[in-house]
Image: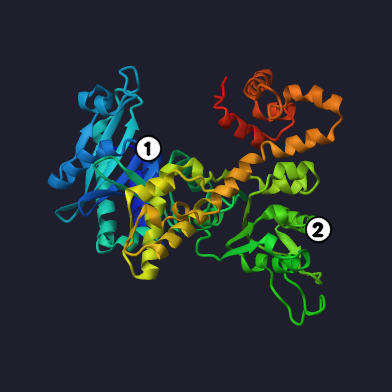
Amino acid sequence: MKKSGEFVAIYEISKILTSPQSTLFRSLRESLKVLSLNLKLQKSLIFVRRGFNPTLLSYYGDVYAEDNLSFYYSLIEQILKNGFPIVVPDIHKEPYFNTVIASADSTQEPVSLFCLPIRFERECIGVLVCEKKRESALESISEITLTLSLASNLFGQKLKLSIGHLEDTSFYENYEPTTSLTKNGDSRIKINNGVIGKSKTMQAVMDLVYHVAPSRSTVLLRGESGTGKEVIARTIHYLSPRKDGPFIKVNCSALPETILESELFGHEKGAFTGALFERKGRFELAHGGTLFLDEIGDISPSVQVKLLRVLQEREFERVGGNKTIRVDVRVITATNRNLEEAVLKGEFRADLYFRINVVSIYLPPLRDRKEDIPLLAEHILNKIGKELNRKLRITPEALNLLINCHWPGNVRELENCLERAATNSRNNWIDEIDVACRRNQCSSPMLWKKDLQLIATPVASFEESKPKEETQRSSFYNPLVADDPKGKIIQAMEKCGWVQAKAARMLNITPRQLGYALKKYGIEIKKF
């Protein structure tokens, strides 16, 4: 007799898949979530046939771009060909699986693998792959297999309605995440609105995005300019229950204080000179949706006070009005400033900082995820090619040149660079000579070299302004003016227990400057 939890899983999945208000991607993901929670699965994935390669259409659980997705390839290909399921009671006891799973160990808990065909009529159109840790030897493999078979039949009926769209490339680019799997194990994850990345850092970011999106928590996006903070904000909105509501964005640094207050909260007629009519603010316009406040670190103290009240009470008054307006808005903020330093200097309110820093997501600069540059370049060239009505391609030499660049402007700079190269190219191939830095027309190296020089410049000028005796006393801890800079850095780091923030204060430099110095002298950070 089947367990009640398995009956509940099938019942809930049938309700989700038959709901007319749910999209294909959302219904599949929610169904896999129900399946995983009720059967206690480690991971569950749905692959569909697309051309010659299986494509990961939806997943739930511990799935990453660097995971052993290529390990499933031969199994999925076999099931798509003959339509028969494959069930392995314990992958650690199978010689074939031990050769492809580096972490396999006979002492580990048994892990069962289920690969079941997803059929439409008699044709196998996809494969359901699940992994589950067996809690005991008495656990019935056949009952779990039967439950998963029922679920795969339900998935087949859902995919039947979308079978025409699954062959359309735009279907995968305009909606939610898909992963394309090839025989060499290369996997790419595309998130709607242009987030592309297979690096570990970006996959960690997107994993956090997927976890925080369904909630109403305030999110603080941090990172350098051009790293895609607005794109991530839109992704959070479209993955949330508020996706049908408005997404309103405000660049706080682009507006003066008086105008920004009116933009955010609105104003009444006659509130100030030029206020000829009543005007709704961005908070009112974003009711039921998401408000994205870019460059939050640049707002004035007076606006910070009013913003704090809205975040706490979800209510405010328009400029010149006394009527309290309540709103249901999710706030996402972004900044490239060091807010902690701004709080210490009194430039940013501490209470507002703690209010917006509920969930903090750091977006890595492009130079820290260079493995994503080929995917980004392909995506950008496809977009530029559509505008120019050309099929653009890039040579390996030009791509290698892009990978080795520093990119102080991050993804925005990469996009501009490729657009400039596409304009300069005489055919549809972008060669090395078409890239601006090969023609000495790129000023970016000047920017990042100047950024590196900031390691020495502020400290040197500070030392010159101090009395000679004091300079001599502090130079012991200043790696930038000492005779043996590398030795002084190592000595300071060891004295501070290899905590960079403490060592930076001892050396009279900023943590960022210390980070550059560590990279410059090739000092490896010790972890305890």
Report the residue at 33% width, 61% height from top: 392
Q: Name the quarter where the C terminus is drawn.
A: top right
Kind of residue indicated by mark 1: Glu
Q: Name the quarter where the N terminus is drawn.
A: top left
Query: Vertical placement of 514 versus 269: above or below?
Result: above
Q: How is the image coloured?
A: rainbow
Left or right of residue 441: residue 388: left
Report the residue at 70% width, 24% height from top: 482
Residue 237 spot, x, y in % from top left: 53, 57
Find numbered disc 1 in the image and state the secondary structure of the residue it sits on: loop
Tell me which numbered mark, 2 or 1, is placed earlier along the sequence.
1
Instruction: Using the image as rendered, state which of residue 416 and residue 229 is in the foreground.
Output: 416
Instruction: Using the image as rendered, state which of residue 217 and residue 475 is in the foreground.
Output: 475
Rate crowding at label 1 as few (under 14), some (14 to 19) or many (20 or more) other CA atoms within 10 Å. Answer: some
Instruction: Using the image as rendered, state which of residue 280 and residue 411 is in the foreground.
Output: 411
Corner quadrant of residue 525: top right
